[in-house]
Image (cartoon, rainbow, N blue to C red):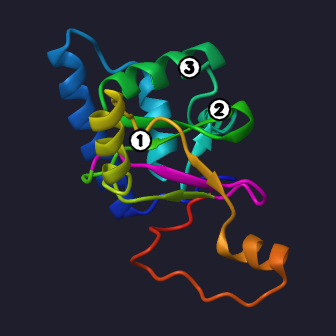
Amino acid sequence: MGAPATTTTDARGLDSLLDRVGRQLRERGERMTAPRRAVLTVLHRADGHLTVEEVADLVTGVDPAVHLASVYRSLDTLARLGIVQHVHLGHGSTAYHLVDDSGSHAHAQCRRCRRVWDLPADVLDPTAERLANEYGFALDPTHAALSGLCHPCRSATTGTAETEPTADSVAKVLH
């Protein structure tokens, strides 16, 4: 998946993101490095969730001097700051995306077509509450994607026409 062309509006949004993150880094005694800038640029331009390998491939188009190890370190730092969210997907892969104004959230991944869906942050609140009350377990619903079958794959499996999910029932397909 390639990064789309940057528009003037995107460039202003990227400048704002880089300024905001730069301030957060300086407050922690860190700085905005070239690899961090390149990673943020790629994630800002991305349409969806990217693996480390996808980020690294796209980073070479932004700054060819950035090495894979620097991409890993940058993603780790940005995730610790809450700027980037990582989510563990099926079969051991991890995907990354920028955290938007709504904050971290849950994800679902179709086990057949591998698409990733953003879910509302509170979608697992009843389950988290039950786990806490009955087992003393603190659930982190943002850490790993829920696995299942999306509507098209489920319909193909059953061969039956099922009703489409509503916009309220699932956020958006991202990857």
Residue designated by label 2? 60
Q: Position of residue 105 (x, y in %)?
A: 37, 48
Numbered-mark total: 3
Task: Check if mark 1's residue and mark 3's residue have beta carbons within 8 Å.
Answer: no
User: Mark 2: few, some, or many residues within 10 Å (few <14, many ≥20)?
Assistant: some
**Picture residue at 43% right of the left edge, 59% below the top:** 119
Residue designated by label 1? 141
Q: Position of residue 49 (x, y in %)?
A: 56, 48
Which residues make up the magenta segment? 103-115
Kindly report the secondary structure that dominates the magenta region of the rendered protein: loop
User: Mark 1: few, some, or many residues within 10 Å (few <14, many ≥20)?
Assistant: many
Q: Is residue 36 above or below residue 45?
A: above
Q: Residue furthest left?
A: 27
The numbered mark, 3 or 2, whose residue comes first in the sequence reads: 2
**Which mark is on residue 53?**
none
The numbered mark, 1 or 2, whose residue comes first in the sequence reads: 2
Q: As shown in the figure, which amino acid type bears the numbered disc 1?
A: Pro
**CA–CA distance between discs 3 and 2?**
14 Å
Q: Is residue 109 magenta?
A: yes
Q: Which element carries disc 3, helix, strand or loop?
A: helix
Along the viewing direction, whichever of 70 and 136 lies nearer the viewer:
136
Residue designated by label 3? 72
